[in-house]
Image (cartoon, rainbow, N blue to C red):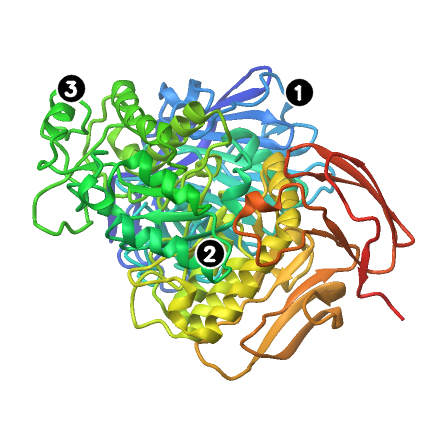
Amino acid sequence: MIMPDPSTSILRQVTGVRSGESDVELSIAARPAGTVGRMPGYLTGESLAEQGIETTLPNLPELELPPADPHPYAVRISWVAPDTVRITVAPPGAGVLADDGTWLGVVTDPGAANVPVTVADTGRAVVVESAALRVSIDRERFALRLDDVATGAEILRTAERLRQAAGLPVAPPVLANRDGITLNLELGPGEDILGFGEQFGRLVKNGQRLVLRCEDALGTGTGLAYKPVPVWHSSAGYTGFVNTGAVVTADVGHSMPSVFGLTVADDALDLYVVGGGGPRERLRSYTALTGRATVPPLWAFGYWMGRCRYHSREEMLDVASRARELGVPLDVLHCDPDWLVVDRLNCDFIWNEERFGNRRQFVEDLAALHTRLSVWELPYLDPASPRFAEAESKGYLVRRADGELAEIDKTPAPDGRPRMLVDFTNPDAVAWWQEMHEEFLADGVAVFKTDFGEGLPDGTTPHGGLPGHHAHNLYPLYYNGAVWDAVARTTGRSALVWGRSGWAGSQRYPGQWGGDAESTVAGMQATLRGGLSYAMSAPGFWSHDIGGFYGPELTPELYVRWTQFGAMSPLMRAHGLRPREPWRFGDRALEICRRWIRLRYELLPYLWQVAHESARNGWPVLRPLAFEYPDDPVAAGIDGQFMLGSELLVVPVFDDGDPAVRRRFYVPAGRWTDVLTDETVEGPAFLTREVPLERIPVLARDGAILPRVPVDGHVRRTDDLIGRPWTLHVYGDGDVADRELTGFDGHSTRVTVSGGTVTAEGSQPVSGRARRSGMSS
């Protein structure tokens, strides 16, 4: 029995072709479609032969065909670079077909205006080819395939070949229905899919079904995500990006093992595909479209501490003083919502003088202890705030379609009162919000933690005319961008926020942290997986709460293990509901953590190089092995360790006990040297080592050159490192010629290492001899 759905149709035939200089627009006949009882697969009104139905199947039921009348769709194939094609599917006349890609604010650079392409229409297929990619569209069944021109390899194809026994297609290339528009791709043998933002499950997404909707995830183990991103990488050789704010569902071989289905809750699909090269080259092209991070200030790479909550000025000054007494370097001390008068899910920038005194004086008192101040915020207003009436009367708050004020969604309020949201599509509201930041920056506040942002409900009508179904996921991008812009404009320096929520393009507003992890081994493991996944979709500067944010009482040993992981992360902050200062976990934990914090400061010259490399190229600082070793068949599945830049392999230990742990880990091809023990190993290989609480494996690859700076008890923060000479640690027995290093002052120094002697030309002092490690005897 046929089960028609009047909203369901399948794109079937190409009926017209219009060619431009760098684009082709196809007219498509979409056919109404239905299913046959409980059988998988779709049936259209064309003849059974045209549909490829197996009429000789013995138990084939009587098939009643749906209506055959087609309705029009349009598909535009355009090029923003030779290696980047944009495929837009929409009803004829839709605005997205004529847009350059920037209308949502995710894409910031539409790319080249005229990319040379050739168009051939063979009668059976339309073939559009640039210097790097070839797109072939079958005229009769609207099948689409992408090939790499240089290698001839097929890198992407729709799933029209996949059928059930009666011949009904189970995954039509493009299906439109009441859920939105679905693109079905065929997963090739051995093809791995990575990405989709900060997802806390396994790094390889095959077998998973992900709903990309920004949520207050309330942890890392709930199946929700603070920072989903509709960007993924395929080991077949391409990177995909859906330019949307609508909810995207990615079914990666979950419902059907050989089908990768993408459903966008919209009537249009705006897909960018970057092909050719490895993840390095493809992320460079993707971030050329959506923006790259700038390098944060040097102090941002130091050690941060926070707590939810420090309740007074005296409490925070005591923490800063204690860090100095105990010789723990500390650059930033963070204050959560207690700095506000109305401080429960509200931010109106009214400073609580009763708790913290005069703001400028407080900043100066912290500065006397060589510490900067970070303050918390969120984009919600409580009706109890004195500034609520102003925001409402001036139209600064988001409204629903019925004209009423929109209330935050899914985040519980402590007192039952609704909270409203600042409308960041309203330029006047943005200016009002930014102006309140400027007063804090003028008093010396260093950075804002841009918390929350996931609470915009569905069905809103933002001031700027943004369609409501795009608004929810784009809200975090606009929110963090507004604050980042205020910091950049007011201070004139490279800006920084500390954001929890995000979407595609969020990498251009560094940095982000991994949300509210549970203080357990599982929480630590999920945190790293989230960071690795995010690195492949929003590459830049990511971090996490050392010790986790909530949950069972944190053991000193897990705190140590998390601190070791944090010391090797792009940014480093200890934070949680309970105290996270290292001296709170006993003398042994303090000693080990202090050693790792100081090691981080020693390695800051190296991390500084990675930061600049990442910002230039649109690469992550914390990297999955699959990023650095895309041709290694093992690397994609490794999500319990990571690369810090290209030179260091870091192996966190996921354990909360005191005894030494047997840790199994993978080293890629080549020779590697543990920077703490000088042990040399050869890869590719899985290794098992007995790892005491005092250390974790941190290995440098052969050929690495790590600039380091001496750190002793006199180093209180990163400012104390400026002007100190660097020592080059060279791994392997080859010479390094003409390595260019970026000094802490931003100027370049060219160094040459030959026979152990260092020659340096530039402003950064570099020691005259290189320490060689891991050399063969």
* Of the image marks 2 and 1, the number of the one nearer the N terminus: 1
* Residue 80 to residue 732: above or below: above
Give the SS element for disc 2. Answer: helix
Give the SS element for disc 1. Answer: loop
**Viewer-closest of 449 and 226:** 449
Label placed on residue 324: 2
Crowding at mark 3 (Cα within 10 Å: few <14, some 14-19, many 20+): few
* Of the image marks 2 and 3, the number of the one nearer the N terminus: 2
Q: Residue type at mark 3: give it.
A: Lys
Residue 473 percent location from the top left of the image? 32, 38
Between disc 2 and disc 3, the foreground one is 2
- Residue 60 seen anywhere in this rendered image of the structure: yes
Per the image, the residue denoted by label 3 is 394
Residue 760 percent location from the top left of the image? 82, 40
In this image, 343 relative to 293: left or right? Answer: left
Residue 630 percent location from the top left of the image? 66, 53
In this image, 19 relative to 419: left or right? Answer: right
**Viewer-closest of 472 and 15:** 472
Label placed on residue 63: none
Q: Residue type at mark 1: give it.
A: Pro
Residue name at image x 53 percent, y 66 percent: 640
* Of the image marks 1 and 3, the number of the one nearer the N terminus: 1
Give the SS element for disc 3. Answer: loop
Crowding at mark 2 (Cα within 10 Å: few <14, some 14-19, many 20+): many
Label placed on residue 116: 1
Q: Residue type at mark 2: give it.
A: Arg
Residue 240 percent location from the top left of the image? 52, 41
* Residue 614 to residue 635: above or below: above
In this image, 703 relative to 710: left or right? Answer: right
Outermost residue toward the bottom in this view: 659
